[in-house]
Image (cartoon, coloured by chain):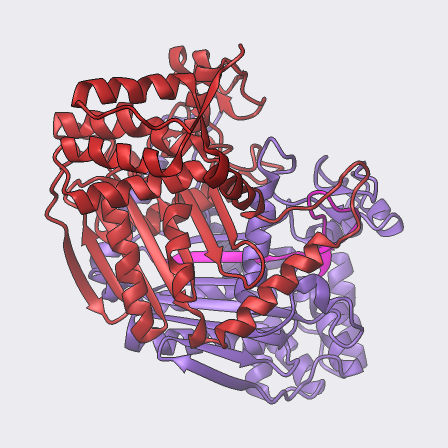
Chain colours: A red, B purple
Amino acid sequence: MTVKYIRVNEQKLLAFSTKVLEKNGMPHDDAFIASRLMVNTDLRGIASHGVAHLKGLYVQRLKTGFVKAKPDIKMYSGAPATAVIDGDRGLGFVVGHKAMQEAIARAKVTGIGAVTVRNTTHYGACSAYSLLALKEDMIGFSCTTGGLNAAVPGASGRQAGMNAMSFAAPCNKEFPYCLDMSSTMAAWGKVEIALRTGDMLPLGWTIDQDGNPITDPKEDETKKGAMVMLGGTKELGVYKGFGLNLMVDVLSSVLAASVCLPELFQSPETASTCTHFCCAMKISGFIPPEDFKKGMDRMIEVYHNLPKAKGVNRITIPGELEWELVQDRQKNGIPLDEVVIQSLKELASEFKVKYDIEQ
Amino acid sequence: MTVKYIRVNEQKLLAFSTKVLEKNGMPHDDAFIASRLMVNTDLRGIASHGVAHLKGLYVQRLKTGFVKAKPDIKMYSGAPATAVIDGDRGLGFVVGHKAMQEAIARAKVTGIGAVTVRNTTHYGACSAYSLLALKEDMIGFSCTTGGLNAAVPGASGRQAGMNAMSFAAPCNKEFPYCLDMSSTMAAWGKVEIALRTGDMLPLGWTIDQDGNPITDPKEDETKKGAMVMLGGTKELGVYKGFGLNLMVDVLSSVLAASVCLPELFQSPETASTCTHFCCAMKISGFIPPEDFKKGMDRMIEVYHNLPKAKGVNRITIPGELEWELVQDRQKNGIPLDEVVIQSLKELASEFKVKYDIEQ
């Protein structure tokens, strides 16, 4: 299938999304923060976690009241560096942003801050939060539980969360280091993209309830396909993907006095909510930030200059290709596929917001 | 090849290893700590990181002076929760143990403690450190850079460290949660085990300099095989294994004002040294520890009770099988293969320590 992409302007998209969320009852500042993080994610090329979800996920949930437009977010703390936030089922972007700001504020005092978050909802890509720490000369980490679409080694069906994490660290001259990964073969949003584009999935990503591979994303709908954990097989280390997946559940759910992700989905009240965790480490608590950033630049240079494998022109570091996309997209616009464009046009019409976002 | 295993007694092995390290100039307390962590690792079934390395790695390096028996370990701190340790090229077990104790002490005050460690050496398995936090009602994390044996996506040959990490959290009724993983397909110690037992390696673990798969561990020696990063291929997420590998280098090396692992190996002075990172999080800084442990038990129960895949009798959690091995081995002895037993007999003879360790 040939898919048409239309380039939209970063600033116009940001303003558009902010207005749509405001029309759905969110205060301006919260609507702006959510849109900023969403558009940042599209700038980085993570099409699975940006405005593609605006209509079907976020606005839909605001309309039904499942996501609260004006949540009463509460915080509890038992130590100077740590806190628990109850998100009151606010939009994950708003709750997650508050959690990372709180972690940064505590790290300024103690050297590290860690905040775990229960009773929240989908917050997009983890890198939107880890990267917030960098301008404070901190290292950022964030993780989140996700929808119940992952396969547990030894179990049948969709049994674990699509848990994901991001780790980011600042550099001097180069792009920031930024690993942003699901603990599974891919985020479920990648299946949604394949449904829109008509592409097949790589063999090994999803399986049916008997463990047979699925490569047609349509079959993931009809057969309730589950996403395999990173590693894939026992011999190639699937327990590592599973272990990282559970680590996210421990940090985000259990440590926040929530139940674990599979149990959240057992109750209609809490199904489709999730949990987050944010951590910031102040570099000056260890070494001078300038030394750290020089060290990062040097590390990246070392990896860039390794002897290349046959047929390989360049070696790239996590965050590098995403940074290049940001440079291009800030200048030339963000390419959105026609299905997403259509969904934004529908939002414009429904909420009487002018559709004026194309580059 | 049929390999003979001999069961040795935990306490006798601990005493034996302690004496051998003392004969190599280490103070009794340090020799005991190193041996305790090494034997703990054998108890957990991680044969690649226990006393199998006593003769060829640790004693050998103490003899040449590459590892200092009485290092002058120094600490610097820029914030209440954080510190940098210079290990003065001491045995990694001693330096790593000190780092984790320091992280725990700081976490008692602030809620989290994080300590990064430069100028240190091989510290065995990461779980030896993460698990130290649990008896303090803390969550433990530790990671380390390792030998230069890993393949970087896009590069040819052995170019990155065998970096590994462990995350552990306490439970009430059940075994502790403990993920202990390399960022690569497997630890290099698993290749060493295959060399001893004559087993082939799983397809996908190691590759030659042109990227062709190697399954005969002997060829990893003759062809300088490199260990593939977790994920394996681009489509199945090898950038995640690579990204986790670099994350370890950032936390352990760059944040400790060391150079990154590949650069450490460029100089004969520092080749075969490594770097660590230890972090402890006080659970009471978030929620009451009893609530956390009940939540962990409940999480484990949820996963245990998932519908099983065809032919599967039980679903296990990271740390569960290792805990069962500990129960068996504390009672019935630790099985060591005959090559390792022979190496211990040689140490007994060389250092005039009585070989009296069999169960």
Instruction: Look at the image and tell me whether residue A146 can be seen.
Output: no
**Residue located at (85% from left, 52% from top):** B221
Please identify the quarter of the rendering in which residue A275 is found: top left
Please identify the quarter of the rendering in which residue A110 is found: bottom left
**Residue located at (77% from left, 68% from top):** B56
Query: Residue B304, image x and y in percent?
Result: 36, 37
Q: Is residue A200 above or below residue B293?
A: above
Q: Is residue B4 above or below residue B142?
A: above
Is B89 on the left or on the right of B2, as rendered? Answer: left
Q: Is residue A267 above or below residue B48?
A: above
The reply to whether the magenta stretch includes residue B241 is no
Q: Which image quadrant: the C terminus of chain B?
A: bottom right
Q: Residue furthest right?
A: B222
Q: Which one is in front, A171 or A199?
A: A171
**Residue located at (44% from left, 75% from top):** A284
Please identify the quarter of the rendering in which residue B352 is found: bottom right
Q: Is residue B347 above or below residue B130?
A: below
The reply to whether the magenta stretch includes residue B152 is yes
Q: Which image quadrant: the N terminus of chain B?
A: top right
Is A160 on the left or on the right of B245, as rendered? Answer: left
Is A117 on the left or on the right of A167, as rendered? Answer: left
Query: Residue B245, image x and y in percent?
Result: 59, 53
Query: Residue B197, image x and y in percent?
Result: 77, 48
Q: Which residues are magenta?
A: B147-170
Instruction: Look at the image and tell me whether residue A336 can be seen.
Output: yes
Q: Which one is in front, A217 or B215?
A: A217
Number of on-image labels: 0
Query: Residue A208, image x and y in percent?
Result: 46, 17
Q: Which one is in front, A142 or B343?
A: A142
